[in-house]
Amino acid sequence: MKIIEAATFTGHRPWAALDIAEIDAVSVRLHWTDQPYIWHVNDGAEVFVVLDGMVDMQVRERGEERVHRLTPGTIFHAEPGDTHRAVPIGPARVLVVERAGSI
């Protein structure tokens, strides 16, 4: 059993993660960051929940780049093959649920 105060988690580097659980090859991780992530494509679905702060989720759809501003409580779902990257606006804490070992 765990109780985690997400608002107090701070990593030692951008995108540092606290592993919360692995359920049937799916990882649940709390991330802290204040720097952008790389453009990437997941090999499985990803659920990205902003808990604290703001994140601009940049996506590429049909050859165009778009930006979606995510605020606390906003959920972003990426299907396999969706190209995206997260760009925090200041420090942010994010819960990510995805295939274990995914980037």
Image: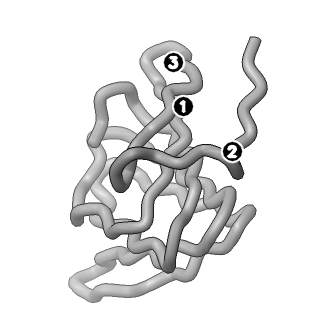
Q: Quadrant of residue 99?
A: top left
Earlier sequence position, callout 3 versus callout 1: 3
* Residue 14 location, quadrant: bottom left
What residue lies at 66% left-to-right and 73% top-to-bottom?
A: 71
Cα separation, mark 2 vs mark 3, equals 18 Å
Q: Which residue is mark 2?
A: 6
Whole-angstrom CA distance, mark 3 to mark 1, is 6 Å
> Could you tell which of marks 1 and 2 lies nearer the N-terminus?
2
The residue where tag 3 is placed is 22
Mark count = 3
95 to 91, vertically: above or below: above
Q: Residue at x 53, y 48 (%)?
A: 10
**Helix, strand or loop under label 1:** strand
- Residue position marked by numbered label 1 in the rendering: 28
Q: Do the numbered discs 3 and 1 sit on residues whose CB atoms are within 8 Å?
A: yes
Horizontal arrangement in the rendering, residue 64 relative to residue 96 (left or right): left
Residue type for callout 2: Ala
